[in-house]
Image (cartoon, coloured by chain):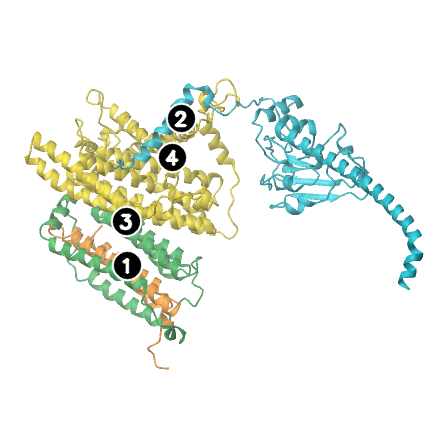
Amino acid sequence: MSLLGGGIFKGMAVTLRNFVGSYFYKDRLTTNDYSWRPSDKLPQRAGEYPKEEGEQLRDTTTVTNYSRNFPMLLHDGSEPMDTIRCVACQICERECPPQCIYIEKSTEKKENAGGKPQFFPATFDIDVSVCMSCQICVEVCPFDAIVMNSQFELSTPDRFGGLLLRRDDLLKSNGYYHKIHPEEATARDKRIAEEKAAKEAKKKAAAEAAKKMAEEKAKAEAEANEGTPDMEENTE
Amino acid sequence: MSEQIAFWMLSAIAVLGALVAVRKRNLIHGVFALMIFFAALSGLFLLLLAEFIAAVQILVYIGAVGILLLFAIMLTERVTGDDGRRMTSRGWFWGLVVAAAVFVILLLPAIQELPPPEAAQAIDPSVKELGHKLMNPYVVTLEVLALLLTAALIGAVTAAQGVRIPKEEDSSE
Amino acid sequence: MTLHHYLILAAVLFCVGLMGAFTRRNAIVVLFSVEIMLNAANLNFIAFWRYSENPALLHGPLFTLFAIAVAAAEVAVGLALVIAVYRHFKTVDLESMDTLREE
Amino acid sequence: MSLDLIRDILIATVPLLVIFPTLFAFTTWLERKALARIQNRVGPNKVGVPLTRYGGRFSLFGLGQPLADGIKMLFKENIVPRDADRLFHLLAPILALIPAMLVLCFLPLEFPWTESLLPVQAFLLDGAVIFFFAITGLNTLAIFMAGWASRNKYSLLGGMRAIAQMISYEIPLVLSAVVVVMMVGSLNAAEIANAQADWNWFVFTPWGLAAFVIFFIASLAEINRSPFDLPEAESEIIAGYFTEYSGFKFALFFLGEYIAMFAISGLAVTLFLGGGAGPGVAALPWLSTVWFIAKIFALIAVMIWLRGTLPRLRVDQLMGFAWKFLLPLSILNIIVAGFAWHAQQQASGILKAIIWVACLLILYATAKGLDQLNRPNVRPREYKYAE
């Protein structure tokens, strides 16, 4: 026989403990104090953080490593458009449930990080007012070109243009990715390296196999050339 | 003086509310006009020092009857409450004539046959006295009323639940 | 304010209700009108009580109290009937419920 | 005569219209702070007293937040849906506020400056308590009006839910107040409060305690507070009846809701918690107002606490709780109170104690039995694969 309504009292005891505890144990409070300077101007576009880059990075890295907000595009080098990973295959655009991605493919090819001439996105827009942070674009991308950012300061006074992130807003370096999501970035890089190695190995093996095949073929042909008269005889 | 202002205002609101309730095409607007009428009437009861009746008027008419009417409209009409078809009934003219005739018949004694107007006596309205009256001389009436309400409740539930109508009756026009 | 004022007001309200009941086709509006008439009658009772010889008897409020209770029951049953009728005829238009009429 | 009357009425009512909206602003801040602390957050702490800079040194625990919120609400765009019924869309928030403000007059709140105005004070009305319930019921209409006028199915659903819920919970609410009315023999709010002088609060009797618990639960449902906030359930029907409201109209709804909270808590204080009674009142009469408001805030603190604790009910659980648990219990409570009160009139000392214990046992056993009867007939889930 439990006390009638005992569950409610138990729950209230838990919340009371949290309430009182939050005043005495500072480590209970999970929020960090948000450093906004009164002199900061309001950003005109989402992601334009009115702070210096260092501070901005610190701000995104103060949130936990597992925080994800909206997607960003990765590049590998110092010059974003030379080493962009995205090849404008438009898979993410098709898969996006709220259809917040808009891509225009470039007309000509250009060398990218892989050293091969590839298409690149002439336009790559994400409407963050529509995006629901589902991370499906990240799942489907075959080139590891799109990953989740954790930047949260996105407020702007402009409801329409300000919340539309352009390609150049979205491009972030791999180093930045390593800073905000170290574990995930390391795992991803490792996987990319392994895949690359496997590809290389496969290529090598394929080349060897082709060589072997060619040798065998040559040998067989030589043998065949010798044996053809017999065969002709046999068939006749 | 203040009593007169209150009377004229409340009676104007009551008559207007009743007229709108009766003539408005949109039924939901009509119900709200009806509630304004009930509220004005409750004010008139208060003016007549029948404060318990005024409270009951609000409680029963606005709180219960009005809501019930709203639900009935939502169940039977379109949600917007617009009565799209022809609003007036066939014999509307004769209806008006009869209403006017009844008005005259009601008005004549009110004006003529009563003794000259007398001032209201000072009374001490007491809910307690009303309660004692309900419990002592009128207790049988109260019990019968309770039975009636129960019967009405059961009747309403059965009527609204509906009897299973056979299929062929449904299809016949 | 005298009794006459209240009686005339009640007469006006009653006739407004009567007019509604006679001139509208919608069953629910007819129900509104009946309510208006009942309330006009209640106003009469209270007014007569207030200006009566012996208000301490509380006849007016008591009668009105019973009338309100009966009216509440009436509305409940009336609306239940309207809904039942709506189920059957798919309308609350009083003039299209004419199954008994000879064609 | 007329001018004096008008002056008296103004003196009696204007303080109510000033004090309670001010308390409303404070309560929103209190609620946000308390809920934040319950969830181990800090809550609003940036906006300071007026005229200090945003995030400045004098933030004073964020006490300026209500003011900032109010200014924001005032300047927001007022959006009316294209198909909405414009008149009703405008009237609904006003109609939501009026009854809530009106019933404040029925609380026996005596301010020092109103002592000379006894004839105009509404709580001296002979049927103050029944008027209170009658006028609180008008809130339902405003909510329905808002839901219907928005021409939005979620709003309409919210409005319908609100009507069903408020009608259901009004019955236990009134029936639990009947116990007190029976014991005092009056519907007059001032008399009820006076009857509880000298610590004779009704909450200290078994039937009074049961009635208080029922009243408190039903009042939570009546003002759409968590865990009974189904009409405005964000996760199910967006925001219910005020989905289509923005700016100042939304603020009016918000204000109306909180004023209703004060009003119903004030009635609970009047009926069960001794009104303005408390230590020191005999010496300093104005302390009774302070005590009254302090008791209201105690009840509101419990409401906030409950909001931080309990999840929202399901619709069928909500209706079942009102009709199958609270209603039978409150009817039984009336019967028990009637018999026991009569019995204890003659009894004294030990017999009285026995009656009280018996009453408590009967009420608790009935509540427990009703609880058992209402338990859904489901076995605990058996896990086949998980341990």
In the picture provided, is D384 more to the left or to the right than B164?
A: right
Residue that mark 1 sits on:
C76
Q: Are marks 4 and 2 in contact (CB under 8 Å)?
A: no
In the picture provided, is A228 more to the left or to the right than A195?
A: right
Residue D307: mark: 4
Q: Are marks 1 and 3 in contact (CB under 8 Å)?
A: no
Label 1 – label 3 distance at C-alpha: 17 Å
The secondary structure type at the circle numbered 4 is helix
Label 1 – label 2 distance at C-alpha: 50 Å
**Residues beneath discs 3 and 2 located on the same chain:** no
> Which chain is assigned orange?
C
Give the percent coordinates (x, y) of residue C63. Answer: 17, 55
> Which chain is assigned yellow?
D
Residue that mark 3 sits on:
B58
Q: Is residue A6 visible?
A: yes
The secondary structure type at the circle numbered 1 is helix
Label 4 – label 3 distance at C-alpha: 32 Å
Q: What hue represents chain B?
A: green
Amino acid type, residue under disc 2 in the picture:
Asn
Residue A18: mark: 2
Q: Which mark is nearer the camera, 4 or 2? A: 2
